[in-house]
Every structure is written in structure tokens, then in C-alpha cells.
Amino acid sequence: MSAIRKVAGGRAGSTQRRIYPATDIDEDVIKALNASDVPLSAYDLVERLQSKGRRVFVVSIYRSLARLCAREAVERVEMTARYRIRDTPSALLMTCEQCGRTYPVAASRQFEELELAIAENGFLPGKVALETTGICRICRATGGEGNE
Ligand SMILES: [Zn+2]
């Protein structure tokens, strides 16, 4: 009886190594980004998804991030090469050098002005990013205690 259970257990174990569907990866990437205070790199995401017992390669994470960025559900923080939930469209992203948090500030008008200036110069832009690094309000108030 216990031998049968072991076989059944073995089969259950092997099903955990089955293909990780792209829709599940996308959903898990969104969950991981939502659960994090700071933007995450593709390698951070691999670690977090693998800690949930799923086997995933970084190339699958990059594909997922490309899909999620195309859907505008996620955005890349260019200065740190990390990803965050895109909660504010056309935002200036302020990344704190002490705690790593990224704060968005709505800047639609500034983006429109930049896109106009780019078009006037006959340049066809890919992504336009407005970003800054510095020290956030929490870290300034606590002397860096905003760090996790
Ligand atoms: Zn900070």
C-alpha cells in the first residue's frame, strides 16, 4: 500500500515539472511585482517564481516581461534595468538610491512636449523615458531607515 503511495507521490512530483504555461508565468510575474516594494530584475523574478516551486528560465521571464510591457501592465525602469507595475501612465519615475523604491509622478504634458520636440527633429522615437535617481521622502526623513 505504501509502495503505491510512493509511486503516486512520484507522479505528482513529476507533474510539477510540466510546462509552465505563458499565461501562468505572466500572472505570477504580476503577482511578484505587486508583492514587492521595489522594482524587480528578470533574475529577481526567476528566484521568486522558483521559490514557489516552479521551474522557470530567465528567457521565459524576459518573454513574459515583453508581453506585459506591450500590454502596458508592466514597465521597465531604464536606469536600473528593473520592472514595475505600470500604475501611472506617462510618468516620471523617481528611483531612490537608498531604499530602491521607484515613485511615479504623472507627467503627461511633459511627455507630449517631448514627443513634439522629437517629431520636429524628424526623429522616430522608440520609448521615451523620464527618470531620475535621488533620495526619497521616507529615506530623507528617516536617514535611510526606509530601506527594507
Ligand atoms: Zn528611499
Image (cartoon, grey):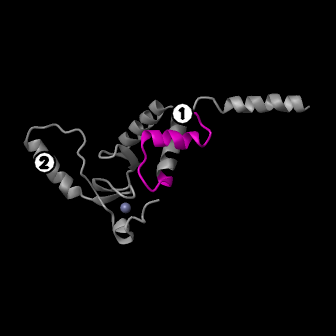
Q: Give the left or right position of residue 44, taking residue 18 as reference.
A: left
Q: Residue at x 41, y 41 (%)?
A: 68
> Is residue 21 positioned above or below 101 on the image?
above
Q: Residue at x 37, y 42 (%)?
A: 69
Q: Which residues are magenta?
A: 34-55
121 relative position to 17: left or right: left
Up-down: is 60 above or below 108?
above
Q: Nearer the viewer, residue 133 or 65?
A: 133
The quarter of the picture where residue 3 lies is: top right
Tell me residue 135's x, y (percent): 31, 62
Viewer-proximal residue among 46 and 135? 135
- Residue 20 found in image quarter: top right
- Which quadrant is home to the N terminus? top right
Residue at disc 2, secondary structure: helix
Q: Which residue is mark 2?
A: 116
Q: Residues within 10 Å of mark 1 (few under 14, many from 20)?
A: some
Q: Residue 12, position in %: x, y?
A: 73, 32
Q: Is disc 1's CB within 8 Å of ligand 1? A: no
- Residue 117 included in the magenta stretch of the image: no
Tag 1 secondary structure? loop
Q: Is residue 139 above or below residue 77?
A: below
Is residue 41 visible to the viewer in this orientation of the structure? yes
Q: Please tell me the numbered disc located at residue 133.
A: none
45 relative position to 121: left or right: right
Q: CA distance from mark 1 to mark 2?
A: 42 Å
